[in-house]
Image: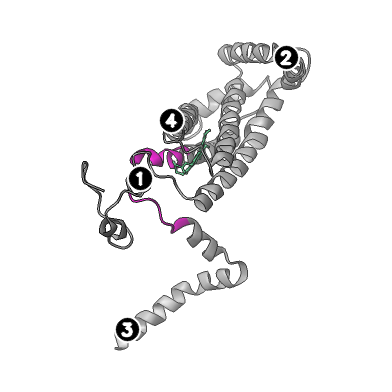
Amino acid sequence: MAATARRQQLQDVALAPLDWVEERSGLVGYTKWFLFRKVPRDITWSQTLGSAALTAFIVQATTGVFLAMFYKPDPVNAYASIQSITEDVTLGWLVRGMHKWGASVFIILMFFHMARAFLFGAYKYPRELNWILGVLLLVSGMAEGFTGYLLPWDNTSYWATVVGININATGPFVGPFLAQFLQGGLSIGPDTLPKFYALHMLVLPGAIMALIGLHLYLVVRLGVSSPPWSRSAAGRERPEAAAGRDGVGEPTTEGESA
Ligand code: HEM
């Protein structure tokens, strides 16, 4: 009896900070709403690709912060600072490698996630707006890769950016203006690098974080869609299986009568 009372007391003490925050902000309630929600019982591993893309983005943001502490965004020092990160800074080679390879992982995961959403028909009503947000995320993610590519300021990155900007310049009406804006002048020069750096580490990550926030809000609000072959979503489920344990039913076997 005394042990139970002591446990209760300990629990109250441990939860006191959370109660304090909840009373003043309601944040604990929102977090529970976000984390503890029902999902269809026949969802698949492919439906974790969005979370995988989110994880890749978090890795990029975290490693990027550390790289920004040592990188120098001006044409005279940029390449030397990259070399110093790789060779002199403790674990710099690892953080740089994670950021460089992680960029490709992030883009690939976004494409896989998009393909999954497309093949499952998850872009249809009522998730059209989330698809549009996803397209904006894809464009921002690719722009993030493009602006990051120039930053080492070596021959590969310089000429790849020249090609990228020239392709943009061929676009109708806005093309030449876009190219001039990206270059910070009539050709790539000393003003291009700081501009790309500002876009790469402030504007685009900010936009991506805001878009991810909206995207996830809609995921929680609308719920995760069932796979196209879902028997329960099609209303072809045994009632006892649909009820199931804790609201999570037994999987139906193939060929079973409805
Ligand atoms: C930074 C990039 C992205 C992140 C972090 C992200 C994250 C997520 C997460 C966690 C989910 C819920 C779980 C899942 O279905 O995998 C989701 C669902 C969804 N995402 Fe993304 N996503 C991203 C990019 C995209 C792109 C590029 C598209 C398509 C153009 C897209 C379209 C959708 C749709 C339609 C859903 C609803 C799927 C359903 O209910 O079945 N997302 N996203």
Residue underneath mark 3: 4
Residue at point 45%, 77% (across, down) = 13
Foreground mark, 4 or 1, reads 1
Picture disc at residue 172: 2
Q: Secondary structure at mark 1?
A: loop
Q: Which residues are magenta?
A: 35-53
**Mark 1 or 3 closer to N-term?**
3
**Mark 2 or 4 closer to N-term?**
4
- Rounded to the nearest whole Å, what is the CA distance between mark 4 and mark 1? 16 Å
Picture disc at residue 112: 4
Asked if residue 150 lies left or right of residue 258, the reply is right
Residue underneath mark 1: 43
- Rounded to the nearest whole Å, what is the CA distance between mark 2 and mark 4? 30 Å
Residue at point 67%, 35% (across, down) = 203
- Rounded to the nearest whole Å, what is the CA distance between mark 3 and mark 4? 50 Å
Q: Position of residue 184 (x, y in %)?
A: 76, 20
Q: Amino acid at mark 1?
A: Ile
